[in-house]
Amino acid sequence: MKSRISVTGNPAYDGRPFTAFATVTPETDVASLNLNWGERDLPERERTKHVHGLHPYLGKFIPQLVEVFLRKYRPKVVCDPFCGSGTTLVEANALGIDAVGCDISAFNCLLTKVKTYRYDLRLLERSVHDILVQLDLRLQPNLFGAPQEVEESQSEYLRAWYTPEVLRQLLLYRSLISAYPYQDLLKVVLSRAARSSRLTKHFELDFPKAPVTGPYYCHKHRRTCYPVTDATAFLRRYSLDALRRIETFARIRTEARTEILQGDARSVAFPPCDMVLTSPPYVGLIDYHEQHRYAFELLGLPQSREAEIGASWKGDSQRAVETYLEDMTEAFANVMRAMPSGGVLVVIVHDRKDLYDRIAQRLGVKVEYRLQRHVNRRTGRRADAFFEDVLVWRRL
Ligand SMILES: C[S@@+](CC[C@H](N)C(=O)[O-])C[C@H]1O[C@@H](n2cnc3c(N)ncnc32)[C@H](O)[C@@H]1O
């Protein structure tokens, strides 16, 4: 059955998109807002403001979209059962709303935790700088002898995707982390540097195909580029960037509570919440573990690939679609058990296979809106444009 339950409010694409986010109140008619931002209306630096840009993540949703719906529904506790890189939790905290997030990926939970943590900024700054000094001392021959050796990595992946020197630098940094406070933040800095220093072509960072070992023509920079031979410059750059982002967020963050549950949204025990705001994984689109493979390998994080709903390696056959429908229904039914009757669910998804009306029917929710939003740039620099659905459901 293809017919949609209801399609309401597809605001005019023409005209200036809505950007007065702070003016949204419970009375605002969201269906009348033009949320079709282009790069000019909502530039990348705004979409990746403060801690949102702490680490690249493919499939993030736009913080300003989250802000609009949090301001509209003003929940006491918002839950994102597929919290990914933590956009909902960060925005909720900035608005003083308690938030719960769940994700199957240990790396995504680490990222969310690092973004929402409350730091002693001076202690953080000292740690972030000191570890770089210690790294330099160990990398360079000095008065006290030869550069420090590090234990060789057993990971085939790491040995294939890094030059021996880059891998040595990354492993040395990793070996120093345990001496510092705020180890999770240092792990995220390391991971970001590791992402940038893989032997990938610059235009393949999101989906690297094979390690590159010599010069290549780079479509992104329109010139000949070379494989990365040094990770320390990235470590330095991302350390400073992380500090700046955390300091900026510290100025607006609130005392609101944040809880992160690493687990399967189908079975995790969610605490009570009165709103769900999420962008779920879609069928056959992205492999969220593989996306951060370097981090899993380097940080030794536990993996739960099998439990990832809709992972691209599972394909998008009819069978995969049916399994996806069951998994999503189970996940939403699970989180709805933690909601009161009348609780609102906002689901943001590019529903190109028209699956979400069927999920809504299976869940027995009331569909209040089904908006479509034109997306011509997310946080990644992908030129392809598409329509994203914003579904607003009520738990009966
Ligand atoms: C579209 S992303 C969410 C992105 C998020 N809105 C953000 O802005 O970063 C979907 C997320 O669902 C997670 N996921 C997939 N299967 C899951 C499961 N069974 N339980 C919980 N999370 C899961 C993926 O790891 C991924 O992070």
Image (cartoon, rainbow, N blue to C red):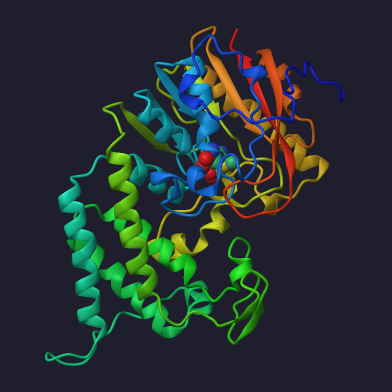
Q: Position of residue 193 (x, y in %)?
A: 41, 66
Quarter occupied by residue 266: top right
Q: Position of residue 387 (x, y in %)?
A: 74, 36
Quarter occupied by residue 86: top left
Q: Nearer the viewer, residue 329 or 367?
A: 367
Q: Is residue 294 above or below residue 222?
A: above
Q: Is residue 161 above or below residue 130?
A: below
- The residue positioned 49% from the left and 48% from the top of the image is 45
Image quarter where ligand 1 lies: top right
Q: Is residue 310 above or below residue 188?
A: above
On-image quarter of the C terminus: top right
Q: Position of residue 353 (x, y in %)?
A: 79, 36
In this view, the residue farthest toward the left is: 144
Is residue 354 toward the left or the right of residue 88 in the image? right
In this view, the residue farthest toward the front is: 15
Q: Is residue 265 visible?
A: no
Is residue 394 toward the left or the right of residue 101 in the image? right
